[in-house]
Amino acid sequence: MKKTKTRLTFPRAAALALLAAALPFFSRDCRAEEAAAVLSTGTGLYFDAYLAFQRALGRPLQVFDLSEQKAGPPLGLKTAVAFGAKAAALDYPRGASVIALIAPGFSPRAGRTFTIISSLPEPGQAAAAYKKLQPALSRLAVIHLSPGPTAYLADLAAACKRLGIEMISVPLASPADFPPALRALRGRADALWLLPEPALITRTSLSVLTEFSCAAKLPFYAPSPGLAELGAAASFAPDLADTAGAAAGALQRSLAREKLPPVIYVPRSRLWVNKAFAEKCGFQLNLSAPAEVNP
């Protein structure tokens, strides 16, 4: 899918003024920093997430924009909050802890201390949300990049089983695998869920999924509301503000010397339903299902 720049909700000049006033940039030769935010780029989605993170944190934090600066992070950095896969993949000082968000598909290098704020909803919440939305759901086909997030899929399968749902893993090597994989699912699944796999998400693959979903009367669940708007029955995922808030909480725990888990799920995810598309395709959905699911 062709990437487009996300527009900021306020003038860029005002945003840059905010950074200049409260959050000065740093370079390798500045003093050792306790913590810093590292943005893959200082515009669009990452910058919006950073502002939400800053509000949740409630205090100034050094910020480093990879699109503007060439120097690496300070050698004495203790904890970095990385916004995006490019920022997460930076060569951080040995011993530094990294909290990464908005980085689907990123895999940390061995020997580094990473905590991922998951872009996936907590498995039990996801299974419950889709079951409430689609009460007759008994077979959920989960489409993902091969080999996929094996630990998440195992937890999701267990959560589905508790609700009487069979989870069907559908690993794909590339978007070209969608047509045969979807044909093989006819009569074997009640719904399709695409995980947030950047390598599989293209305009063509979303179009194929949408057309198949409607023709076969199998609801297609997208990985985010934005993608659901392109043609899907619904999505269940954490929103940007809650994801940023979880990252702020993780940073506070890290600076308090608390050991963080490798993955943190955002406590709350939200259900977004494309009612017009659901009605057009004749999906049997409970359109009064709750808009969010809490632990």
Image: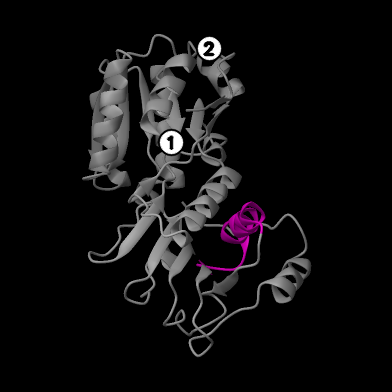
Image spot of residue 104 (x, y percent) = 40, 51
Considering every residue shown, the one lying at the far bottom of the view is 29
Residues shaded magenta:
38-58
Marker disc for residue 205: none
Q: Is 175 located above or below residue 27 in the figure? A: above
Query: Which kind of residue does numbered mark 2 sit on?
Result: Asn
For residue 176, side relative to residue 129 (left or right) = left
Residue located 71% across and 76% down the image: 20
Where is mark 2, residue-wise? Answer: 286
Answer few, some or many: residues within 10 Å of disc 1's Cα (few below 14, many 20 plus, some between 14 and 19).
Answer: many
Image spot of residue 92 (x, y percent) = 38, 74
Residue located 31% across and 31% down the image: 142
Q: Quadrant of residue 13?
A: bottom right
Answer few, some or many: residues within 10 Å of disc 2's Cα (few below 14, many 20 plus, some between 14 and 19).
Answer: some
Q: Secondary structure at mark 1?
A: loop
For residue 4, side relative to residue 100 (left or right) = right
For residue 203, side relative to residue 146 (left or right) = right
Q: Nearer the viewer, residue 193 or 175?
A: 193
Residue located 46% across and 45% down the image: 203
Residue located 57% across and 43% down the image: 242
**Does any portion of residue 6 appear in the rendered image?**
no
Q: Is 290 located above or below residue 44 in the figure? A: above
The stretch drawn in magenta includes residue 53: yes
Where is mark 1, residue-wise? Answer: 121
